[in-house]
């Protein structure tokens, strides 16, 4: 009996470590996006290179979290509820790792942009950046507190990011048509906004998994593809 | 003992069904890409709409496969080797579902392209389409036959697709600069090539998981982000 309590305490500790590992990864990816956007706005190539270098730590933690999940599955035979948490954790971990990759993609484009003159002051992109950072934070909060309403909020924010992406595309399109010399720069900014949109999709994916974990109801696939008739 | 043999036969059957479910999903996604590209080349909006409608079946099968994985984990306490297969299966299933989404994205762009005059005959895009379809087929073959060499081949093909994407971008860029009236169409084609590149990334992700499953060696993260200095 004492032994069983001992085992159970260990098991609880492993689940807790997994949760903390996910939260920490969430923090790293949010920071990566923040830095990538700061590098964009400040035309800071050094910071952009830091985002690219920092991705190693994200990949490392992604692998560690995944190993934690597999180890728990292998050794603990988790019951239904924990099993659903671990299945959720595997997916959320994957989303976070991909968000880190998107931050790197943005940083790569910033390096290219910094070789060209600035097209115009950024207005929508920083707004998108703030929203996607909030989405990551709230989706992780929703996970930890099993808060379905917060997860729903993340899903709503995704629609705003989709609309902003389309708006950025259409505005840049007018620049490109008016002055072909802006095309190269405008394309790079389009790709940055597209990467932010994909980050929002991953945050929504996390929120969907939280809803699935808490309610058992699958809301995925509702919006995994792009809205109809869009340029972006 | 008879009972144990019975259980074990059931278990083998479940693993087999999971493998078949993955293969079937691989077939569906390959077909979706084929149809999306045929819709592009034939300017066939009806076929594009079929790709979009068909994605429901892909999402359905994705969910079924995932449930199979969870059920096996919950009921069977799989040993190390099977556990690694199921962890691999969860990830591969996710990659295939995303490939289906990319085919839908391509079909959406085809619908918009069909409202505009054709820019030029397609040369690189169909080639990219053939390569990514082969990559999916070979990555699934590599999974079933635990063939690391085939998985390595898929990883090499990904580099070719990356190069072709960059080539398509640069060619379209010259069209856009020469004639601003081509910008809208060129942007849509760029996005199609980008979606093909992302499909190739997912196929590479499948190949990476096969290598991990067979050798226990993680090759992920080597190329999950985009090559440096690229426009695309």
Image (tube, coloured by chain):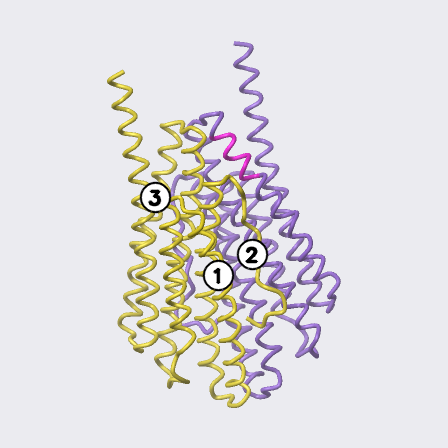
Chain colours: A purple, B yellow
Say what secondary structure mark 1 lies in.
helix
**Mark sitting on residue B223:** 2
How far across and how far down the image is residue B119, in percent? 41, 85
Does residue A183 belong to the magenta stretch? no
Instruction: Mark 3 vs mark 2: give the one in front.
Output: 2
User: Along the line of sight, which residue is nearer the eye, A64 or B161?
Assistant: B161
Left or right of B66 on screen, residue A160: right
How far apart in space, not on screen, are marks 3 and 1 (Cα)? 26 Å
Chain for numbered disc 3:
B
Residue drawn at x 48%, y 25% as measured from the top left: A76
Q: Find disc 3 in the rendering and name its residue.
A: B65
Q: Residues within 10 Å of mark 1 (few under 14, many from 20)?
A: many
Q: Quadrant of residue B38?
A: bottom left
How far apart in space, not on screen, are marks 2 and 1 (Cα)? 9 Å
Left or right of B194 on screen, residue B38: left
Relative to residue A209, is residue A67 depicted above or below?
Answer: above
Chain for numbered disc 1:
B
Instruction: Mark 3 vs mark 1: give the one in front.
Output: 1
Please state the extent of the stretch shown in magenta in the rendering: A65-73
How far across and how far down the image is residue B10, in percent? 27, 29
For the residues beneath circles 3 and 1, the answer to whether they share a chain is: yes
Q: Find disc 1 in the rendering and name its residue.
A: B158
How far apart in space, not on screen, are marks 3 and 2 (Cα)? 27 Å
């Amino acid at each position: 009996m004492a032994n069983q309590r001992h085992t159970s305490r260990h098991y609880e500790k492993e689940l807790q470590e997994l949760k903390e590992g996910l939260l920490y990864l969430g923090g790293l990816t949010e920071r990566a996006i923040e830095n990538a956007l700061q590098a964009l706005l400040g035309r800071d190539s050094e910071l952009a290179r830091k985002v690219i270098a920092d991705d190693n730590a994200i990949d490392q933690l992604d692998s560690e979290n995944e190993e934690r999940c597999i180890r728990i599955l292998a050794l603990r035979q988790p019951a239904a509820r924990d099993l659903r948490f671990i299945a959720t954790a595997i997916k959320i971990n994957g989303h976070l790792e991909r968000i880190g990759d998107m931050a790197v993609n943005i940083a790569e484009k910033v390096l290219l942009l910094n070789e060209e003159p600035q097209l115009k002051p950024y207005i929508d992109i920083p707004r998108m950046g703030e929203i996607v950072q909030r989405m990551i934070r709230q989706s992780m909060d929703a996970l930890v507190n099993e808060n379905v309403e917060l997860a729903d909020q993340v899903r709503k924010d995704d629609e705003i990011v989709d609309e902003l992406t389309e708006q950025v595309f259409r505005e840049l399109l007018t620049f490109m048509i008016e002055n072909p010399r802006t095309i190269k720069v405008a394309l790079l900014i389009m790709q940055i906004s597209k990467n932010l949109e994909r980050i929002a999709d991953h945050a929504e994916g996390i929120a969907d998994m939280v809803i699935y974990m808490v309610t058992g109801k699958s809301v995925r696939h509702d919006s995994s593809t792009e809205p109809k008739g869009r340029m972006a």
